[in-house]
Image (cartoon, rainbow, N blue to C red):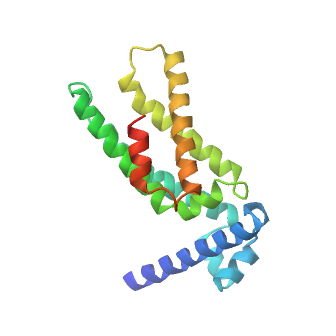
Amino acid sequence: MAQYEHKRKITDDNIVKAFLKSAKDRGVDAVTVRDIIQYAQINRSTFYRHYQDKYDLIEQLEYRIIEEIDNANKDFNKFSMKDASIKDIKSAANQFVYQFLTVIEKYQPILEIMVSAKGNIQFTIHLLDYFSKMVSSTTTSFISKLEDKDRRLMSAYYSSTAFGVVVFWIHNFDEYSKDDIYEFLINQ
């Protein structure tokens, strides 16, 4: 059974790589299942055992990324801020930022295409929306004295700024290390 799962994982990785190669050449909207199966050198039925269509593939990629970010965020949200010192809160937040950047680093090849002019705007919107909600939920503990209206505005500002830096990194990956981006984000 483990051998089957391993083979399935290899095939799935091959499908994703073929999708990304085709999307990089032609743009996500122009990619067809036929393009994917040609690049992956698989049968159409093999593709459909893994995905319903290319939109299902995109949704699954989005889900994988968000699920891993969620797992990092859950670790941060488990942290009790009620009796914690500022130093402990900052340390937990910094740890989350590093874990978050590790997920972005892992999925950079996917994100580089999906969050670009050749990418999928829905993917970008979902990711930004998720990012905004995540920042909003974590900043509530830090800025509880603000009115809800101002807190939402501040969360939108911080999430958009941080998201912009992450998108910049995704597209300039060879010039900046994860540590460069981490240091920049935590020192702002």
Q: Position of residue 48 (x, y in %)?
A: 65, 74
Q: Is 120 rendered above or below residue 149?
A: below
Point out residue 150 in the picture as x, y percentages from the top left corner.
52, 17
Q: Residue at x 44, y 79 (%)?
A: 5
Whether residue 54 is situated above or below residue 161 in the rendered picture: below
27 to the left or right of 8: right
Q: Is residue 102 left or right of residue 126?
A: left
Query: If the image is split into quadrants, where does the N terminus sit?
Result: bottom left
Find residue 28 and report its image quarter: bottom right
Q: Nearer the viewer, residue 176 or 35?
A: 176
Up/down of 179 relative to 44, above or below: above
**Residue 34 at what x, y percent from top left?**
75, 77
Residue 44 appears anywhere in the view: no
Question: Residue at (46%, 62%) from the top-left corner?
Answer: 106
Quadrant of the rendering where the C terminus is positioned: top left
| Residue at the far right in the pictured view | 30
Q: Is residue 90 above or below residue 153?
A: below
